[in-house]
Image (cartoon, rainbow, N blue to C red):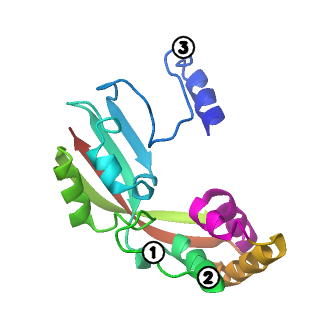
Amino acid sequence: MLAIARERAKENGLANIIEFHEADAESLHLPPSSIDAIVCRFGLMFMPSSWYFESNESCPCPGGRIAAAVWSAPDKVPSFVVPLQIVMKEMATPPPPPESPGPFSLADTKLLRQKFEQAGFHDINIEAILSDFKLPSPKEFVDFVRSTAGSLGAMMAGLPAARQDEICNKVADAVRKHADPRIGTVSFTNDVILVSAKR
């Protein structure tokens, strides 16, 4: 991702203006009031909410802005829920506690607004959009999920490779229901919540 970002910055004549660094959002170690803007795509809900919304280090300075995308309710995010349900069933994994970080921990828009307000944000705007998700085949869908859905990969990390493959084959079988019978393309429509605010 950083390599692509650097290349795009170079293409747009910004290579000497923008720097890109890999870092842990929970330990940025930046000087106070040094963040003017934050853009977070499908990451905010995985952070401990009490840490993020109470930490001055992680929040924009006064006048700064934040824009984030988080998943909506589970029944509105099939591209994530279909594989998640299979992995949890195969591994007999109990559901996480309601307040714990996770893909749907900020799906409640009232709670989302409340957390931003309590952290001192204003001009809060929340809207839902539809996001189409398409991949050429069930196999490529599974490969994509294995490489990008960190929480699912972490759940299976301790399993033998053969067992991981067995579970992934079951995921592929399940997503075939969402594939175009003519060309095999897998297609999902997900609800995404967009939130922006000023501090």
Of the pair 83 and 13, the residue shown nearer to us:
83
Taking the image as shown, residue 4 lies to the left or right of residue 129, namely right
Residue 50's x, y, as percent?
31, 54
**Quadrant that contains the N terminus:** top right
For marks 3 and 1 on the same chain, the one whose residue lies earlier in the sequence: 3
* Residue, disc 2: 86
Identified at 42% across, 54% down, the residue is 47
Of the pair 173 and 32, the residue shown nearer to us:
32
Q: Is residue 45 inside the magenta stretch? A: no
Of the pair 54 and 11, the residue shown nearer to us:
54
The residue under label 1 is which amino acid type? Pro
How far apart are labels 3 and 1 at the CA level?
Answer: 45 Å
Give the structural element (helix, strand or loop) at label 1: loop
Snapshot quadrant of residue 158: bottom right
* Residue, disc 1: 96
Numbered marks: total: 3
* Residue, disc 3: 16
Whether 39 is drawn above or below 103: the answer is above
Nearer the observer, disc 2 or disc 1? 1
Give the structural element (helix, strand or loop) at label 2: helix
Nearer the observer, disc 2 or disc 3? 2
Mark 2 and mark 3 residues within 8 Å of each other at the beta carbon: no
Snapshot quadrant of residue 29: top left
Q: Which residues are magenta?
A: 135-158
